[in-house]
Image (cartoon, rainbow, N blue to C red):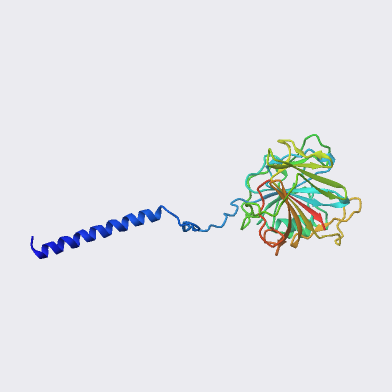
Amino acid sequence: MNGKARLWLLALVLAVVAVTTAVVVLVATRGTVEPGTADPPMTTTSETPTPPSAPVLAVKIDNVGQARPQTGLCDADIVYVEPVEGGLTRLLALYLDEWPETVGPVRSARRTDIGLLAQYGKPVFAYSGAAPELLPVLAAADLVHSSPSEVPRSYFRGGDHAAPHNLYLRPSTPPTTARPPGQRPLEFGSAPSSGTPTDRHRVDYPAAGYVFDWSAESNRWAVSMDGRPLTSTECGPLSAATVVEQRVKVTTDEIIEDSSGARSPVVAAVGGGAATVLRDGGRFTATWSRPEASAPTRFHTGDGGSLPLAGSPVWILLAPE
């Protein structure tokens, strides 16, 4: 072999050795992590939670003693507890994904409902009627009205309750004029570390009291009212994954009265204030904020961080400051 051939062969051997060494080093490096370091994060695309695709059904439900047990509350995704005349409360049950077969007893609307529902797109609102002074404002609200006046065939009288606590709704197909909210009404996620373990929480109104007892076995808060478990005919005792005591300003400036002459309280559901959030067996001191009527309500920890909810059912008690 001449000199040029030897040089060519030597260069080829050195090239093969270099490539082999590089491959070995690359494989070894990919299989190890230096102390105090981590593999570089994978590149992912951040996705905004998909907003609801179906319109919301909102039903105003009676909850005085003569109206219990109610029907259809087990399927509610969100239940608002609202103060009404005489220190009593009524429920506003919201169905975001699936509508119940039957729900009730259905009772009359309040101005508070208009403010609450503005954050839920253009929902279908089922109620039995309203005070004459409220009817013009209610008619002008961005709602699909579903009272007995609009859809009489959807309502019936029945059950074991006496009138007026025996009006029930069988929801029909959502009308095309209804519109789902543009974004998820509530924020769900992992709990922060600022909670205090608790197994019971009480919220009192002048003429109604609610107690929520934590069950680690069911991972739910059992709902009681006026000293007795609150039940629904289709499922029995009610429970919630998340409970919120939302402190709100309540006024009685409007001359809207019930049959006894008591003025109807109105909740200020836009703005902000103090709150307590119950989730995962813990109590979280919180604040709430809603900058405008069309914006969803959000909850925050004391330091301003996000305080997501554990899941539904969610019970939100609008309690006077």
Q: Position of residue 86 (x, y in %)?
A: 88, 51
Q: As rendered, which of 257 and 184 lies closer to the eye?
A: 184
On the picture, is 32 further left or further right than 237? Answer: left
Q: Please provide percent x and percent y for residue 187.
A: 64, 54
Residue found farthest to the top: 160
Count of numbered tags: 0
Q: Name the outermost residue toward the right.
A: 260
User: Which residue occupies 81% across, 45% down?
Assistant: 210
Which residue is drawn at the image coordinates 53% and 57% (left, top)?
47
Residue 290 at x, y percent in the picture: 71, 62
* Residue drawn 63% across the image and 45% down it: 173
Q: Would you place residue 320 above or below residue 148 in this image? A: below
Direction from residue 214 to residue 27 in the image, left or right: left
Decide which of 294, 147 is in the foreground and name it.
294
Q: Position of residue 190 (x, y in %)?
A: 63, 51
Q: Residue at x 84, y 56 (%)?
A: 265
Task: Specify the quadrant that holds the C terminus.
Answer: bottom right
Please, is residue 182 above or below residue 147 in the view? below
Evaluate whether residue 12 shows in this view: yes
Front-lying residue, 24 or 56: 24
Is the residue 112 above or below the residue 158 in the image? below
Q: Nearer the viewer, residue 134 or 67?
A: 67
Q: Looking at the image, can residue 169 be seen?
A: no
Quadrant holding the N terminus: bottom left
